[in-house]
Image (cartoon, grey):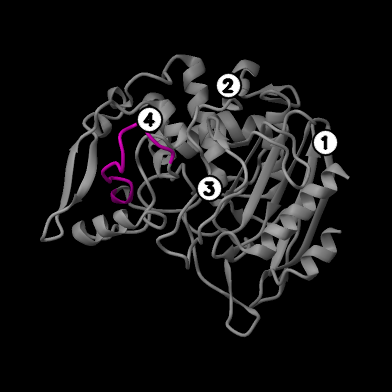
Amino acid sequence: MFEEAFAGSGLPGAVGMIVDRDGVRFAQALGVADTDSGSPISVDTPFQIASMTKALATVAAMQQVEAGRLALDAPIGDVLPELADAQVLTGFDADGKPQTRPAVRPITLRHLLTHTAGFGYFFIHPELLQYFAAVGMPEPGSLAGIRTPLLFDPGDKWEYSVSIDWAGLAVEAVTGSKLGDYMAEHVFAPLGMTVTGFFDALPDGAAKVHVRKEGGGLKVQPSFLGGGEYHNAGGGLVGTAPDYARFVRAMLRGGELDGARILQPETVAEMARNQVGPLRAGYMGSAMPQLAAPYDTFPDQHTGWGLGFLINPEPGPDGRSPGSLAWAGIFNSYYWIDPAKGVGGVFMSQLSPFGDPAALACFGTLERMAYS
């Protein structure tokens, strides 16, 4: 089933894995890592996992909550003074200068981890593109890219955003360590994630990002989300499907894998609980469709958000249970975690723009296989 789906996808390469609490049930690599060289994909090929970084960074933040260094509902400005006096964007004057007002309430870690803090992404929200047009576009990987006004008051809405980048900076502030160094010791090493990390350049042998050419075929499009002046908790990790599958298994097992515990069971349960109440989470618009078209995982469901994950309240069309956890990376990588049935999966590819129908079809096939 997976081979047939891949053959009809036109993807350069992909890795699919299905796991349960006890181990790996399926793993297959197909295609090439780079259409220029023809180098074949292997199960252990590194990928830019992009926003799949967010769930791992959330684990690091929740470890600080367990340790008492951070609190979910305390003002995060106590830890990150830059966020102590948050401003909300209200519009632009006749000369294009941004107009702001003070936020009505402080930003908390819970706001950051649930994308309800008020931040956005410039490739999703056109008002942020207009803001950067006024103040200057930031250099890739610079902190200026996340130093924006809010789009709404904290807690009022759900909008996908750079808020996990700020959560990563909060981890650095309370641990005194670079985020990658902290996660290497306290997340990756305990889970046996031997390849995953923040890199200054794309590692040798990693899969390259591709785009579809007009008239058919593929070409490499140089893209790298890492490097820069900080470790991007929102999307900067490179890792492998087997590494990420170990994280999926740990979440299925309540925060433990092979005798190593990264979170307490009650913390994992809290992460898997809808945190946004009546707000609907998960829909992303688009200000730059060449990067990501408008996307909605379950357009027919009132999806929620936990601490780090999208949550579907109803059964998914490909088999996942209500209350499953999921998200994705901008280069068409996807995962899901189904605590009710004890199964999950990881799909890795490197294709732009996000939300490619053929990549989603391959991911859907992987999920159906898991429940067949």
How far is mark 1 from mark 4, CA to CA?
Answer: 38 Å
Given the current orientation, which residue lies at the most extreme bottom position? 215
The image's mark for residue 294 is none
Q: Tell me the quarter of the image containing the N terminus.
A: bottom right
The image's mark for residue 155 is 4
Mark 1 or 4: the one toward you: 4
The residue that mark 2 highlights is 270
* Residue type for callout 4: Gly
How far is mark 2 from mark 3, CA to CA?
Answer: 21 Å
Q: Is residue 215 visible?
A: yes
Seen at 62% across and 85% down, the residue is 215
Seen at 35% across and 42% down, the residue is 119
* Residue type for callout 1: Gly
The residue that mark 3 highlights is 51
How far is mark 1 from mark 3, CA to CA?
Answer: 24 Å
Judged from the image, the secondary structure of the residue bearing numbered disc 1 is: strand
Which contiguous range is marked in magenta?
144-158
Residue 321 falls left or right of residue 226 = right
